[in-house]
Image (spheres, helix red, strand yellow):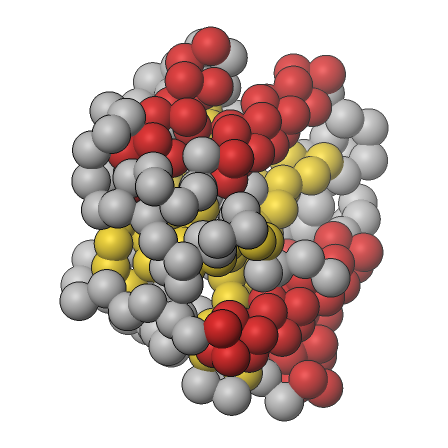
Amino acid sequence: MVEIKTDMALETMREAGRVVAHALAAAREAAAVGVRLRELDEAARTVLTKAGAHSPFLGYQPSFAPVPFPAVICASVNDAVAHGIPDGYRLRDGDLVSIDCGAELDGWTGDAAISFTVGTPRPADLDLIAATQRALDAGIAAATVGHRIGDISHAIGTVARKAACGMPADFGGHGIGRQMHEDPHVPNHGRPGRGFPLRHGLTLAIEPMLMAGGRNDYYTDPDGWTLRTIDGSRAAHIEHTVAITDDGPRILTLP
């Protein structure tokens, strides 16, 4: 079931999205060489608590996961594509970090992710992050009334292929609203003109995940959550919650 949101619901989702943006900013600000990943989680958790928001990540357990997720952010480093558990790992100079975070406020949800480097960046990592941002921008630009999900997917996939990057098979964006994951699924590759039609009030989490090695396969760590590139290459993940409106796409997870 795909729920089309009212304009009032979109305003509430915008407030949830603002909390997400602030939590991601706090986690990024806390990131430095020697800082543990769990400290980034603590920074984001503080923002959620002060805003009176709840985490849709904490305790979340989809069918593929052997245990509930234990944190309010996913913290994925270097070859980790997504779903990394923030633990005692200390950040090192040159690490590429992706942070994913969500917030539920007044019954509505926002979800976003950022990627950045710590300390001295590798030029190749900066290129990967830039390509991932371009893919997201292209997907958002295609998220207009009259288009279909496949137009978003095609736009993202075109940028990824041009950058010679892979994307993890089976993972992509999703509908979002009262729950973090709702219909429809938003693949990161696809054919234009196919899939669910985009109309005013549809809200989507659009999230390209690019892998520098160019392969689409991945493996899952023993923790049952962390996805890693099969060849050890670096990965980046950037996401926004976006509303389809008659006035064009509206990003709900900005500060």
Looking at the rendering, which quadrant does residue 1 occupy? Answer: bottom left
Q: Is residue 148 left or right of residue 18?
A: left
Looking at the rendering, which quadrant does residue 14 occupy? Answer: bottom right
Q: Is residue 107 above or below residue 205?
A: below
Please name the residue shown 34% across and 25% down the image: 154
State the image coordinates of residue 235 (x, y, percent, origin top left).
Answer: 50, 31
Please name the residue shown 34% across and 41% down the image: 146
Please name the residue shown 41% across and 18% down the image: 158
Please name the residue shown 68% across and 50% down the image: 90
State the image coordinates of residue 240 (x, y, percent, origin top left).
Answer: 54, 51
State the image coordinates of residue 5 (x, y, percent, origin top left).
Answer: 39, 71
Residue nearest the observer in this picture, 54 or 90: 54
Residue 75 shows in the view: no
Q: Is residue 150 above or below residue 239?
A: above
Q: Is residue 226 left or right of residue 218?
A: right
Number of callouts: 0
Q: Is residue 203 above or below residue 195?
A: below
Residue nearest the observer in this picture, 232 or 239: 239
Which quadrant is the C terminus positioned in?
bottom right
Residue 249 shows in the view: yes
Q: Is residue 73 left or right of residue 60?
A: right
State the image coordinates of residue 167 (x, y, percent, origin top left).
Answer: 37, 28
